[in-house]
Amino acid sequence: ELYTVEDKRIEYLCLSLSEQYNTQIIITMKKSRRFIIARHGETDFNRERRVQGTSNESSLTDKGVSQAAALGAYISEREKITKTICSPLRRCRQTYAQISEVCAANDNALPEP
């Protein structure tokens, strides 16, 4: 899922959302700040319809890796990312790693979170 928001005070909100909902957040800034908020890709828990919460047990499925790669392709073609924030949970880090890999391959490397 991809959400975009424009607001000068949104960074604090993004940090709170990242921690509260275990969601990966990628932030872009241009003349005004533009934020891209991305949820992690599909996990084995999602597929099994199990609640993950703050559990760090779930990992991305092959579909989740493909979803993250597709988001990476979208971002690398349309955005110049200047700052990233990522939850420390495995599924979020895996999503970030896949997005980052695709962006770097397309000569649009992401900064480390």
Image (tube, grey):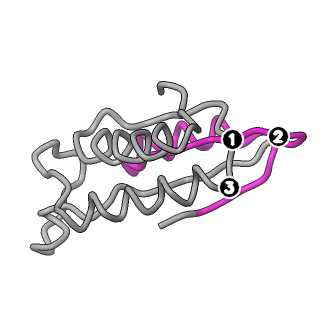
State the CA–CA distance, disc 2 to disc 1. Answer: 9 Å
Front position in the image: 62 or 11: 62
Q: Write the residue at 54% across / 64% down.
A: 2
Q: Which mark is residue 8?
A: none
- State the SS at label 1: loop
Give the image quarter of residue 51: bottom left
Q: Which amino acid, mark 1?
A: Lys
Check the image and report above or below for 16 versus 43. Answer: above
Q: Residue pushed farthest right?
A: 31
**Which is nearer the eye, 94 or 76?**
76
Which amino acid does the dot numbered 3 rest on?
Arg
Q: Is residue 58 above or below residue 93?
A: below
Residues in magenta?
Answer: 3-32
Residue wearing tag 3? 78
First in sequence: mark 2 vs mark 3: 2
Mark in the foreground, 2 or 3 = 3
Q: Residue at x 54, y 36 (%)?
A: 15
SS state under label 3: helix
Q: Nearer the viewer, mark 2 or mark 1?
A: 1
Residue at 27% in and 57% down: 65
Say whether marks 2 and 1 touch (CB < 8 Å).
yes
Q: Which residue is mark 1?
A: 80
